[in-house]
Amino acid sequence: MPVNVAFLGREYPAGLGYEVGREKIREFAEAVGATHPAHRDVAVARSLGYPDVIAPPTFAVVIAQRAEQQLIADPAAGIDFTRVVHADEHFTHRRPIHAGDLLTTVLHVDSILERAGMAMISTRVEITADDGAPVATVVSTIAVRGDAPAAPAAATASEPSA
């Protein structure tokens, strides 16, 4: 089943919020090698003017991928995740994400381009705080490879080979 281009322009409304926890931030910082103490130490983060430990900038992907799953998991979208290659991602931050945030997302399908048997899908996830204030925007592009061509049949002993 090819990618359904009718999903272009689709918007997925906010679902359940994501409550950002200190340990999730600490684990993510460790995983990506972010060494600033404000990712781990509440006192350091507060001394810098933040209400709690702050997440590394790429932590926004954790929240965005939960929103993107709505599209990926929708059978009508026609996305075979076994054929997906991550192509691009960028972040626009309005403020740091910190422990204690309750964040919600709205997913937008901004672009679906089909070329050479491949579909390029660009999504935008708007992340907001529980008071509605914008926190970050994550724009991602995935490439969905088309079906692999059928392999040629092997020559049999009775067929001449080239």
Image: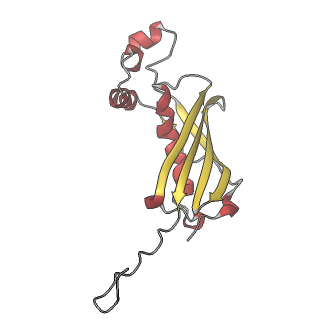
Instruction: Give coordinates of residue 142: x percent, y percent.
Output: 54, 50
Q: Quadrant of the C terminus?
A: bottom left
Quadrant housing residue 91: top right
Q: Furthest residue to the bottom?
A: 158
Q: Extreme top residue here?
A: 47
| Image-based side of 82 in relation to 90, left or right | left
Q: Is residue 80 left or right of residue 141?
A: left
| Location of residue 39 in the rendering, given as x and y in whole percent from the top left corner | 40, 20
| Quarter occupied by the N terminus | bottom right
Q: Total of numbered circles in the picture?
A: 0
Vertical arrangement, residue 154 with respect to residue 131, above or below: below
Quadrant housing residue 36: top left
Q: Where is 27 relative to 42, above or below? A: below
Image position, residue 48 (x, y; %):
49, 8
At a point 48% along the width and 27% down the height, the residue shown is 100
Colour pattern of the rendering: secondary structure
Q: Residue at x 34, y 81 (%)?
A: 154
* Rendering coords of residue 55 (x, y %): 45, 25
Please state which of residues 127 and 155 is positioned toward the viewer in this rendering: 155
Among all residues in the image, which is located at the extreme left? 157
| Relative depth, front residue between 71 and 12 | 71
Q: Nearer the viewer, residue 123 or 41?
A: 123
Residue 23 lies, with reference to residue 143, above or below; the image says: above
